[in-house]
Image (cartoon, helix red, strand yellow):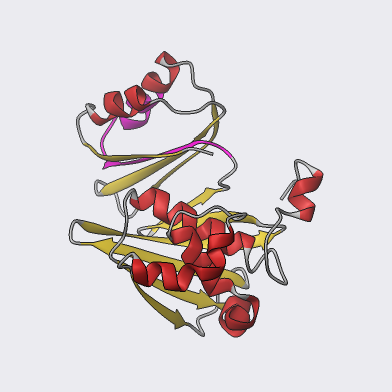
Amino acid sequence: MKYRTVFDIIGPIMIGPSSSHTAGAARIGKIARNIFGRHPETAEITFYGSFAQTYKGHGTEIALIGGILDLDTHDEGIIESKALAKEQGVDVTTLISEEETEHPNTAKVKLADEFGEVEIVGISIGGGNIEIISMNGFHLRLSGHHPALLVLHEDRHGMIAGVSNVLSKYELNIGHMEVARKSKGSEALMAIETDQQIPQALLDEIQQIPYILTVTRLQA
């Protein structure tokens, strides 16, 4: 990874012995919450690698729950996140896994309510920086540093061109784009990072394209 500023190395101000285990974890939780798009009824957290071995001592679980509750890394309320989750009716389950992963600081977050669920896998790569490497089983790479658009659609001819045309119409520049599918002709996911904030009107227009299933916006 290329560091953009000195703050990418130092990391944000955050309570805890390690920004990787606190700020990074909080950001993974917050992005999961943003992708889910509403207050979850249940949250299942699975820690891998170093996270699994040290999450209690480093406060990783507390930070990640704070992110799920949509708290920022500097919010002092994170300290009380487990109690806040209980007050807000979020049933949190924490698991650890011995499964080997590509990065030692890996967490899987599954949020759910009566209307649906979302599962993301994130890694904390140092200095509070993260990458989201999976969403609902689709492999992708999102840094969380830029506005992003997640477009779930049927795997049909012309879908990428259709979405790109809408982005061009609103004069949004694509900084990074990935397309993933589980199999030919099944569901596919476009993950698009942009240089500008994404307006609601753009989401509404993309949603009208045939074979689009869901459109999710992540503002940086």
**Range shown magenta:** 146-164
Q: Compared with residue 159, is residue 127 higher up or lower down, i.e. above or below?
A: below
User: Which of the image's four quarters has the C terminus?
Assistant: top right
Image position of 57 (left or right of 113): right
Residue 97 horizontal/vertical position (percent):
48, 83
Q: Quadrant of residue 18?
A: bottom right
Q: Compared with residue 179, is residue 53 higher up or lower down, i.e. above or below?
A: below
Residue 10 highlighted magenta (yes or no): no
Residue 160 highlighted magenta (yes or no): yes
**In this view of the protein, can residue 11 be seen by the observer?**
yes
Q: Residue drawn at (60%, 84%), measured in percent from left and top?
A: 53
Residue 54 horizontal/vertical position (percent):
63, 82
Q: Quadrant of residue 115?
A: bottom left
Q: Residue drawn at (60%, 55%), measured in percent from left and top?
A: 73
Residue at far right of view: 6
**In this view of the protein, can residue 43 be seen by the observer?**
no
Q: Quadrant of residue 156?
A: top left
